[in-house]
Amino acid sequence: MTTPYLKDGPVGTIGHTGLICTRDGPVAAIKLNRPDKRNALDEAILIALYEILDVLRQDSDVKVVVMSAAGAVFSAGADISPLKGIIDPTERRRAFAPLGMRISDRLADVMKLLTAPDILTIAEVNGSAVGAGWLLAMGCDFRVTAEDAQFWFPEIELGRPVSAPTAELVVAHLGPAIAKEILLLARRYNADELLRMRMVNRVLPSGQLAGASREIACRLAGLDKLALSVVKQRINANINEGFWARKS
């Protein structure tokens, strides 16, 4: 039976109304819970996500974390609601620059923990993953994805380059030619395309995602934690914590 571990609402400095965390034995689950904002990521939620992941990775009994989202969208990316009302494109780009930098720095902190070997992570992508939302899913070890999900990085259209680690991670996964399509053209990809590119592990109807992620989680939970950690560290040799130390 699933019991509350870290949950919606303040728990020390860890709680955040946009996150729900539960634990079932060696498997923890974190759900983005801002469906009214399409699970957009602001500084506060990224700080809370970092703190939750940090607690979980230090728990010797936790082997796997499943990340999912409430509503029809996995994450719309950076929360740009502070730009509401700014119509002029030049002014929007100017206003987005410092906001984007702060969110990028917080996201880099989260990515350090996702790519570190302490825990295995599964992204349950129930809908579109945009910008920082796609990066969050990309940082997980396994990705199960809804059939109708779409993925893209809109930063170039906002006049802001993605961070160097983000560009390098996309290149590490897909090579420079596809990375240029993704990051320079802001091309949208559907789930089947990413499956053919081996960027996701499974594409399923949305109602089957939880079962698929649970199947992977249970398989991992039955294996030796140290062995899992060592193998992940070796696979992620070029995208480890040092890789994310460069935030700009």
Image (cartoon, helix red, strand yellow):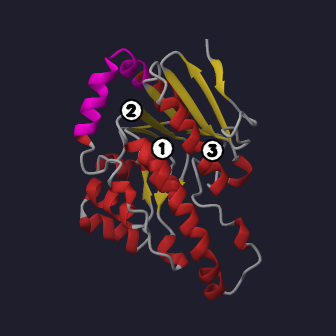
Left or right: 149 as drawn, with respect to 69: left
- Amino acid type indicated by mark 2: Asp
Q: Is residue 112 visible?
A: yes
- Amino acid type indicated by mark 1: Glu
Q: Magenta span has 223?
A: yes
**Can you say whether 47 is above or below 161 in the image?**
above
Tell me what residue is drawn at x 41 percent, y 31 percent.
Answer: 119
Question: Would you name the residue on which mark 1 appears?
Answer: 147
Q: Earlier in the sequence, mark 3 or mark 1?
A: 3
Quadrant in which the C terminus is drawn: bottom left
Q: CA distance from mark 3 to mark 2?
A: 18 Å
Question: Would you name the residue on which mark 2 appears?
Answer: 118
Q: CA distance from mark 3 to mark 1?
A: 29 Å
Q: Earlier in the sequence, mark 2 or mark 1?
A: 2
Q: Earlier in the sequence, mark 3 or mark 2?
A: 3
Circle 1: element type: loop
Q: Position of residue 149 (x, y in %)?
A: 51, 49
Is the residue marked by circle 3 packed among few (<14), some (14-19), or many (20+) residues within 10 Å? many
Frontmost residue, 7 versus 128: 7
Q: How many marks?
A: 3
Name the magenta segment's main secondary structure.
helix
Frontmost residue, 196 versus 62: 62
Question: Would you name the residue on which mark 3 appears?
Answer: 48
Image: magenta residue range: 216-234
Frontmost residue, 3 versus 124: 3
Is the residue marked by circle 1 packed among few (<14), some (14-19), or many (20+) residues within 10 Å? some
Q: Nearer the viewer, mark 3 or mark 1?
A: 3
Q: Position of residue 66 (x, y in %)?
A: 50, 32
Circle 3: element type: helix
Circle 2: element type: loop
Tell me what residue is drawn at x 57 percent, y 61 percent.
Answer: 103
